């Protein structure tokens, strides 16, 4: 009986410690400013992040606020202390003028949803 109680106590403690391990995502920057860019120029930019938590970080989904922005997420988990990237490609073959777009990142992090932003101005040359 005593062994059973000790075993249950050990299992409970192990589960409690495991439940406290969380992934954390910290971005180097949350807004990328393209500045003034020419129509038809390279629209690819990269958001860099670090998993500052103590569990593997899994990016489950990355979506943009419109079809003119195509995000690309990492396919593999990011281990604690490691860095990763979310690539964003803005279609620069649009009408000239200012733009602001949002990218929603979903993950298993302690804060599971993060909003990233891109902005800039397309100019004719």
Image (spheres, grey):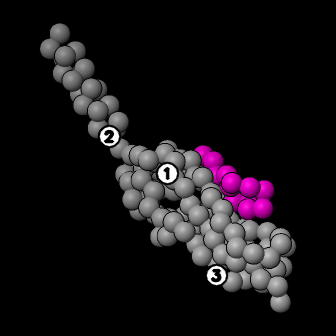
The label on residue 57 is 1
Q: Are marks 2 and 3 in contact (CB under 8 Å)?
A: no
Q: Earlier in the sequence, mark 1 or mark 3?
A: 3
Position above or below: 74 against 9? below
The label on residue 35 is 3
Q: Secondary structure at mark 2?
A: helix
Task: Report x, y in % for residue 42.
Answer: 76, 79
Q: Which residues are magenta?
A: 60-71
The label on residue 20 is 2
Task: Report x, y in % for residue 107.
Answer: 53, 47
Residue at (83, 89) in percent of width and height: 125
Residue at (32, 40) in percent of width and height: 20
Q: Nearer the viewer, residue 76 or 65?
A: 65
Q: Is residue 75 visible?
A: no
The N terminus, quarter of image: top left
Q: Is residue 78 visible?
A: yes
Task: Report x, y in % for residue 45.
Answer: 66, 73
């Amino acid at each position: 009986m005593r062994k059973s109680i000790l075993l249950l106590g050990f299992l409970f403690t192990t589960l409690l410690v495991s439940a406290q391990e969380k992934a954390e995502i910290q971005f180097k920057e949350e807004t990328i400013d393209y500045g003034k860019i020419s129509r038809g120029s390279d629209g690819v930019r990269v958001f860099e992040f670090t998993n500052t938590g103590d569990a593997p970080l899994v990016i489950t989904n990355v979506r943009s606020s419109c079809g003119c922005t195509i995000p690309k997420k990492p396919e593999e988990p990011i281990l604690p202390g490691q860095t990763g990237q979310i690539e964003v490609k803005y279609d620069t073959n649009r009408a000239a003028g200012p733009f602001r777009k949002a990218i929603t990142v979903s993950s298993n992090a302690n804060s599971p949803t993060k909003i990233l932003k891109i902005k800039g101005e397309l100019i004719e040359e």
